[in-house]
Image (spheres, rainbow, N blue to C red):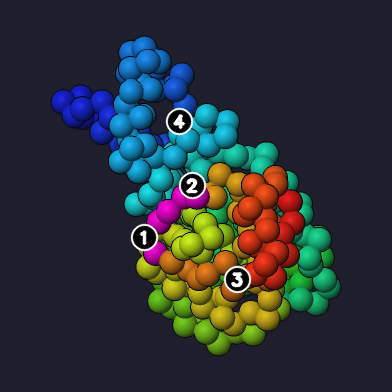
């Protein structure tokens, strides 16, 4: 981080790189008091640049990019494991399913022990499933992105356009009632949308930290999903809206 920048801008740079922080970690990082950090956070909140969750965790309100895979893997890991275990309950033998890329999807893949066909964009998911004789694993074609080991590209999108999928499990970098499911690049949004459009039913698979985060690129409205699976209960007003839109909400 550039030391000549105002501290509040360095806080934003830190969040861009590491995704999440808290007052203690920022106070130690910048060697200032909690009160000083709170003043910076108040300024950033007033500008709508950050979001403070129930547990005091600080995140960007608007994501310009996705943190590196290794960093994401260690964030909300217990929540992601719970989400993965719940998602397996939707599987039935003989299904053709799509598994999106991401650390939550990897946790889901770790729990699969049903004879199905899996189409995925994620190299980590494909490697996890390749040792399971009961699972027929297909990885989408095209160049693998080195930052997240995923095949978000035009060749993958064309391949998906020719498939018939029973159930698509889709991830998002952020979501809310007004904007729907969101992500950080156009090609990611396009590939996710193509998988959705070729599936009979679809599932939004997210940990609760993504609620309220905004990104530049829209995947779809929430009512495009048949299911929303997360690890803990959302506020009652959000839950009521999901029910109103006929989305099966599982936590």
Label 1: how many Cα within 10 Å (few below 14, some 14–19, many 20+): some
Q: CA distance from mark 2 to mark 1?
A: 20 Å
Query: Where does label 1 land, which residue?
Result: 216
**Residue, far bottom:** 162
Can you tell which mark lies on residue 223? 3
- For label 1, the SS is loop
Query: Where does label 2 land, which residue?
Result: 69
Label 4: how many Cα within 10 Å (few below 14, some 14–19, many 20+): some
Q: Earlier in the sequence, mark 2 or mark 1?
A: 2
Query: Where does label 4 land, which residue?
Result: 21
Q: CA distance from mark 4 to mark 3?
A: 32 Å
**Residue, far left:** 4
- For label 2, the SS is helix
Which residue sits at x=48%, y=68%? 219
- Asked if residue 215 is among those painted magenta in the image, a careful observer would answer yes
- For label 4, the SS is loop
User: Between tags 4 and 2, which lies in front?
Assistant: 4
| Residues at discs 4 and 3 in contact (Cβ within 8 Å) | no
Q: Give the image location of residue 236, x and y in percent.
A: 67, 50
Q: Is residue 106 visible?
A: no
Q: CA distance from mark 1 to mark 3?
A: 19 Å
Which residue sits at x=41%, y=45%? 61
Horizontal arrangement in the rendering, residue 9 relative to residue 171 (left or right):
left
Q: Earlier in the sequence, mark 4 or mark 2?
A: 4
Horizontal arrangement in the rendering, residue 190 relative to residue 5 (left or right):
right
Q: CA distance from mark 4 to mark 2?
A: 17 Å
| Residues at discs 3 and 2 in contact (Cβ within 8 Å) | no
């Amino acid at each position: 981080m550039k030391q000549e920048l105002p501290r509040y801008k360095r806080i934003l740079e830190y969040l861009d790189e590491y995704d999440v922080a808290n007052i203690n970690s920022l106070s130690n990082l910048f060697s200032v008091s909690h009160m000083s950090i709170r003043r910076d956070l108040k300024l950033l909140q007033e500008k709508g640049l950050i979001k403070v969750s129930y547990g005091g965790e600080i995140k960007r309100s608007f994501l310009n990019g996705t943190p590196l895979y290794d960093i994401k893997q260690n964030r909300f890991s217990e929540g992601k494991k719970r989400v993965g275990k719940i998602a397996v309950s939707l599987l039935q033998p003989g299904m053709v399913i799509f598994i999106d890329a991401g650390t939550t999807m990897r946790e889901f893949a770790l729990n699969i022990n049903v004879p199905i066909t899996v189409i995925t964009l994620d190299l980590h998911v494909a490697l996890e499933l390749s040792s399971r004789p009961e699972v027929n694993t297909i990885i989408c074609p095209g160049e693998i992105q080195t930052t997240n080991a995923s095949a978000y590209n035009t060749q993958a999108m064309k391949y998906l356009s020719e498939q018939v999928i029973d159930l698509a499990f889709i991830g998002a970098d952020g979501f809310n009632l007004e904007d729907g499911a969101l992500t950080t690049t156009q090609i990611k949004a396009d590939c996710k949308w193509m998988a959705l459009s070729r599936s009979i039913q679809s599932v939004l698979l997210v940990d609760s930290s993504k609620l309220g985060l905004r990104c530049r690129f829209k995947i779809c409205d929430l009512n495009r999903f048949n299911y929303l699976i997360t690890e803990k209960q959302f506020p009652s007003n959000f839950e009521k809206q999901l029910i109103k839109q006929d989305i099966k909400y599982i936590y």
